[in-house]
Image (tube, helix red, strand yellow):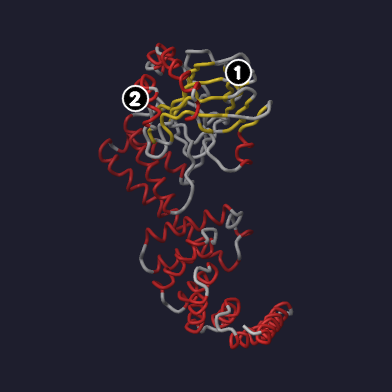
């Protein structure tokens, strides 16, 4: 571009912007149109003039200009969003879906584009894909403090957002009902009555009302089971075998600690703030490390091979097996001066057991406000949906073996239903690019 042409383009853009600042879109359009005569691929000018055509009801011309913008500068998310909206107005629903999918892949936070994608898919009869798009749109918006009610929803979008939320409510109910139906046929509806209530609470159809107000799961609350921070030992007869082998487990632990290259931070996050929100130290550095045998349901075969007797004992236990969630088994290594701050777990369908292996003085666990001092070789089981914390105020390292097992108050049918339901929720959330809480 020669200097004269460049100066002319700069002047026209400035005049267009001045028109917008003065509230004169007609003048702005005139200057942008002249700019396009000089630079036919100018994206800003193409987007603005296309928007004016769309306002006048000329969707065909708007689409043509936005296709030119997309050709001049591919992978511009804003262009693709605007193009998708224009294609919808022109009646080209397949084209709109393609443009909006490209745009939201580039910019997942564009919740209005996701909403429009859901609308286009719904009109095409793509019910499940529309459900996924709507759910992703609403969650992305609400994560940014939008669409929580009329007060933070643009007036022009309120009807569409209400429709999307109603579509989500009906669609998720139907989806998860289909997951439970084979189990209803197998076990009978009466056996799954508490699961039905659990699903209703998850979907927001019923309020969560634990008998103990201290209990607040982050993900899935299973109703009508006892609500208590700690569980009595007699509910877990398998703990006797684990405790009898504490010395064997401790010996394998010490071998790991002597060559700690396989230890990793328990908190797998790149955010210093996330780590600071959960762990702090009275010394120079907070450190909560882990040696996993299972993590989110994945078995660490090399770690199990390195500690074969511990792994064999874990394999023989009634651990929770839920795809991508459980079991979670590990040596939990808390360095001197480290405090795991109060937090809550995801569901009361499973309980957490600690087998203390190395416990210096001044180390303890607090669950629901009740303090428990670990005793080496003696298990303690608790419901981590109560707020809980742990600390090591000593000058030595503290280690416990952690594992999760089913809540013993769930029946076989209920465990099978929770397994299938949580798996289906995870699959749907992943499709929708919505995080399912774990841990």
- Position of 23 with respect to 160 (left or right) is right
Q: Tell me the SS state at disc 1.
A: loop
Q: Quadrant of residue 421?
A: top left
Residue position marked by numbered label 1 in the rendering: 396
- In the rendered image, residue 75, in percent from the top left (x then y), is placed at 50, 68
Residue position marked by numbered label 2 in the rendering: 315
Give the Cα separation between the discs numbered 1 and 2: 30 Å
Q: Tell me the SS state at disc 2.
A: helix
Q: Residues within 10 Å of mark 1 (few under 14, many from 20)?
A: some
The earlier-in-sequence mark between 1 and 2 is: 2
Please name whichever residue, 73 or 295, is drawn nearer the observer in this view of the structure: 73
Relative vertical location of residue 21 with respect to residue 430 in this rendering, above or below:
below
- Position of 418 with respect to 1 (left or right) is left
Please name whichever residue, 338 or 60, is drawn nearer the observer in this view of the structure: 338
Please name whichever residue, 253 or 1, is drawn nearer the observer in this view of the structure: 1
Relative vertical location of residue 411 with respect to residue 186 in this rendering, above or below:
above
């Amino acid at each position: 571009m020669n200097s004269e042409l460049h100066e002319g383009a700069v002047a026209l853009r400035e005049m267009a912007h001045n028109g917008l600042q003065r509230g004169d879109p007609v003048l702005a359009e005139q200057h942008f149109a002249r700019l396009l005569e000089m630079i036919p691929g100018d994206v800003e000018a193409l987007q603005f003039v296309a928007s004016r055509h769309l306002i006048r009801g000329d969707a065909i011309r708007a689409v043509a200009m936005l296709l030119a913008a997309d050709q001049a500068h591919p992978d511009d998310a804003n262009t693709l969003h605007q193009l998708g909206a224009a294609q919808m107005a022109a009646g080209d629903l397949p084209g709109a879906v393609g443009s909006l999918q490209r745009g939201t892949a580039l910019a997942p936070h564009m919740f209005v584009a996701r909403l429009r994608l859901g609308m286009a898919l719904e009109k095409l009869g793509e019910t499940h894909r529309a459900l996924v798009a709507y759910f992703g749109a609403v969650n992305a918006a609400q994560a940014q403090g939008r669409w929580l009610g009329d007060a933070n929803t643009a007036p022009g979008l309120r009807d569409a957002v209400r429709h999307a939320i109603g579509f989500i409510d009906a669609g998720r109910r139907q989806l998860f009902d289909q997951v439970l139906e084979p189990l209803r046929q197998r076990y009978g509806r009466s056996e799954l009555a508490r699961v039905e209530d659990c699903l209703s609470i998850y979907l927001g159809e019923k309020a969560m009302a634990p008998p103990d107000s201290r209990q607040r799961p982050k993900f899935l609350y299973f109703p009508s089971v006892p609500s208590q921070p700690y569980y009595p030992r007699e509910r877990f007869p398998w703990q006797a075998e684990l405790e009898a082998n504490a010395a064997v487990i401790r010996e394998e632990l010490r071998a790991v600690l002597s060559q700690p290259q396989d230890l990793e931070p328990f908190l797998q996050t790149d955010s210093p703030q996330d780590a600071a929100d959960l762990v702090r130290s009275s010394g120079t550095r907070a450190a909560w490390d882990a040696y996993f045998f299972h993590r989110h349901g994945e078995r660490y075969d090399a770690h199990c091979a390195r500690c074969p007797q511990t792994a064999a004992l874990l394999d023989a236990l009634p651990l929770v097996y839920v795809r991508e969630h459980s079991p979670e088994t590990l040596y939990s290594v808390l360095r001197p001066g480290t405090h795991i701050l109060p937090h809550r777990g995801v569901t009361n369908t499973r309980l957490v057991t600690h087998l203390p292996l190395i416990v210096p003085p001044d180390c303890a666990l607090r669950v629901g406000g009740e303090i428990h001092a670990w005793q080496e070789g003696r298990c303690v089981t608790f419901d981590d949906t109560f707020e809980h914390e742990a600390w090591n105020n000593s000058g030595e390292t503290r280690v416990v073996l952690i594992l999760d097992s089913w809540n013993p108050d769930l029946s076989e049918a209920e465990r099978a239903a929770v397994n299938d339901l949580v798996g289906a929720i995870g699959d749907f959330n992943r499709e929708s690019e919505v995080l399912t809480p774990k841990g």
